[in-house]
Image (cartoon, helix red, strand yellow):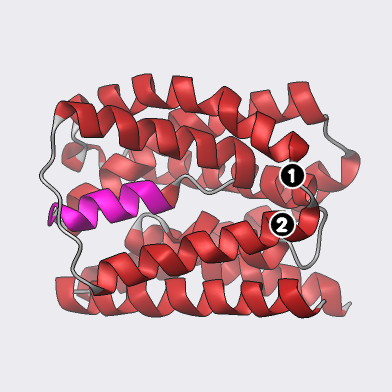
Amino acid sequence: MGTVLSFFCIILVASVLQTSTGFGFSIMATPFLLLLFQPQEAIQINIILSFLISISLIWKIRKDIDFSIIKRFVIGSIVGVPFGIIIFITMNITAFKIGVSILLLVLTLLLILNFRVKPTRIRDFIVGGLSGLLTTSIGMPGPPLLLYFTGTDTEKGKLRATTLAFYLFIYFISLITQIIFTGTNKLIWESSLYAIPIVFLGLFIGQIIFKWLNQQIFKVFTYILLSFTGIYLLIESLYS
């Protein structure tokens, strides 16, 4: 019962964050799902539910999507996806968790240090490639996108819409790749099915929060979320 309750709480909080920020589900859900499931199960549950969230939200926010960037992200991600699945297959569980936690902490540090970068076509391709690699390897396409968009001072509405649109592609491709190379199981699909009502509750709450979440609060909230998640997972990985 405790595991089930923990699972639903993780999904609810992650859904709220995804809806209100555009990136929160995978960053929040994956590290904590790794405490309840095997890596393959945690990643596939995350991908399935994230894909569902993107489908649910994309029509409403479609006007804010930057399609030119999406095109370059997609092309870059196609290169990154196969490298990500190789990393996933060859990495042990402890190293896997530590890698995720360090990635989150480095990302947080760069954001706090006010990392800035000028957007270019080449960098769009690189960010897409890194996102594709991270989706198939750890189920988290968000960190490169968040760092890039924040570093270029992208408005939060555009950030949310563009990342969600890209997720539609990358999560679908990554799920197919994961199933082909690592398989799937009944627990993954049953858990995802049970979580759907919780996801939609989170979507509703997240939409309300998004209306009053100004840019400064958005940034502070991002730092807290990333640092807490990274530190928690690192401690759990080192001492488990």
Q: Which residues are magenta?
A: 143-153
| Front residue of this view, candidates 75 and 62 | 75
Q: Above or below — where is 207 with respect to 192?
A: below
Residue at 13 percent of width and 40 percent of height: 119
The amino acid beneath tag 2 is Ala
Mark 1 crowdedness (10 Å alpha carbons): few <14, some 14-19, many ≥20:
few
Disc 2: which residue: 95
Q: Which residue is mark 1?
A: 91
Q: Quadrant of the N terminus?
A: bottom right
| Kind of element beneath mark 2 | helix
Calculate the distance from the C-alpha at mark 1 to the C-alpha at mark 2.
7 Å
The answer to whether residue 186 is left or right of residue 227 is right
Crowding at dot 2, Cα within 10 Å, few <14 / some 14-19 / many 20+, comes out as: few
Q: Which residue sits at x=21%, y=58%?
A: 150
The image quarter containing residue 82 is top right
Residue 99 x/y as whole percent: 60, 57
